[in-house]
Image (cartoon, grey):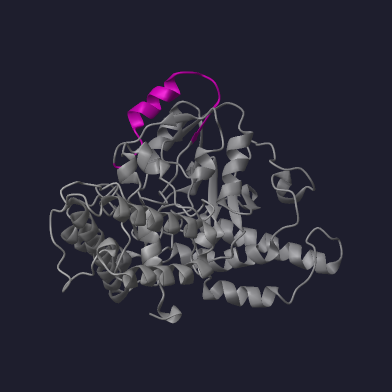
Amino acid sequence: MSNQEKIYLDYNATRPLRYSARQELVQGFELCGNPSAVHSSGNTIRRMIENSRDTIAQALKIESRRLIFTSGATESNNIVLKNFKGRVIISATEHSSVYKVRDDAIICRVTNSGMIDLQYLEQLLLETDEPTLVSIIAAHNETGVIQPLEKIQKLTQKFNACLHTDATQALGRVNFDWNSFDFISFSGHKIGAMTGIGILVINPDKPLCPLMHGGGQERSYRPGTANFLGILSLKAVIQETLEEDWSSTKKLRDYLELQILDISPLSIIFGRTETRIPNTCLITMPNVNSATQVMSFDLNNICVSAGSACSSGKVKISHTLKGMGYSDDVANSGLRVSLAPDATKKDVDHFISIWKKIYLSCSDNMHVQSGTNSVDTTTHNTPVYNNSNKSVFRIIDKLKSYCLTTGTNKKNEFVQGIKEQSSFKKKHHHKTKNKVHSNKPAILQFY
């Protein structure tokens, strides 16, 4: 496949810049001025920022004075959690920008489907009269599970606790009354605005201290020169985000899941029994680690991820799945597919065909290691350690090409896999076939 035919199935990580945002930016590029300046150019920029604030607030049906512009949801989350004076309760499946902020945060357990344990949350709220903040993600970025925020809001209200939600993945896909929350975080690039722009919705009656100090911009909650172009792009996309129709996407997502389960009945679809946002699927490929899956799909021009994108380009074991009670082996085999609202069945079918090739190729490798089945080379390619050097060179050529475009982190992981596979071949070449070495990584042979 050519670069033009790349299939992007990672919309929860970043959505392509919308056309409306591009059009707004074209006009914004012609303007120059610091919104804090007193001259006419500065005043023009400042008025456009305030008009954008009013437009966004009106779309969200909140007061303009509650809306603070930030660099994104990560910053918004940090402002809330780092500056709250009192107890903080978070779920075991929060985004890293919440999960890693407070060492003293109290973890509220979740079910194995990812839903917050409401009885346990109530128990935690009963423990003390100390000021408490509850921070629960609205719709999960990995599993897509939507939390029962109305019930959580009633609990926090009952115990006079503050409620914060990271609603980054919920905006436009879940209907909430945003006035029910004390603090809300959003991120622009998830909905087709520029990167580097986000929103923090505050409760003026429950003030926070600023995370940074400087000028008095954004009511001193977020000092520094405003990201004028980012704000314009966010204003441009907010209304169409809220009006977007995801019904066909949900049907495609459900179709994808049924097809995968037909190929691999042992695969786990996390949160499938719960209400989820319509485009998201987190599914395991048994005995195939996430890094291998992501790189293999990438070599086939399909962009997917192993979970949250906020990990410096590294594939790590998901603390979300660990928090849901799954083992390291299961958590390390998950793959997230997040579809576009205009995704096509053709793209989904192609993803399924590649998924099947990866799965069967790795299954063949496992069978050869254990000696349980012979490989039918008329249907599947022969595993690398049971083939000629040509197969190895073919892998290395692909690796060189891959590393030129993706950097060294993934290169090191992939090279380590090749080394371990080569070591396995040398050590066990003369041993009996019935010895199982299923803990060794499989190198895929369908390129």
Coordinates of residue 354 in the picture (x, y in percent): 29, 68
Left or right of residue 246, residue 96 in this image:
right
Residue at 63% in and 54% down: 71
Residue at 43% in and 58% down: 414
Considering the image in quadrants, where does the C terminus appear?
bottom left
Q: Is residue 135 above or below residue 363?
A: above
Please tell me in which quadrant of the rendered image residue 28 appears: bottom right
Please tell me in which quadrant of the rendered image residue 263 appears: bottom left
Residue farthest toward the front in the current orientation of the protein: 430
How many marks are shown on the rendered structure?
0
Q: Report if residue 125 lies within the magenta region.
A: yes
Residue at 40% in and 48% down: 140
Considering the image in quadrants, where does the N terminus appear?
bottom left
Front-most of 220 and 322?
322
Front-most of 9 and 288?
288
Point out the stretch of residues depicted in magenta: 113-134
Left or right of residue 161, residue 215 in this image:
right
Q: Is residue 402 above or below residue 4?
A: above
Coordinates of residue 310 in the picture (x, y in percent): 51, 52
Front-most of 309 and 360?
360
Coordinates of residue 194 in the picture (x, y in percent): 59, 65
Residue at 17% in and 54% down: 265
Residue farthest toward the left in the current orientation of the protein: 373
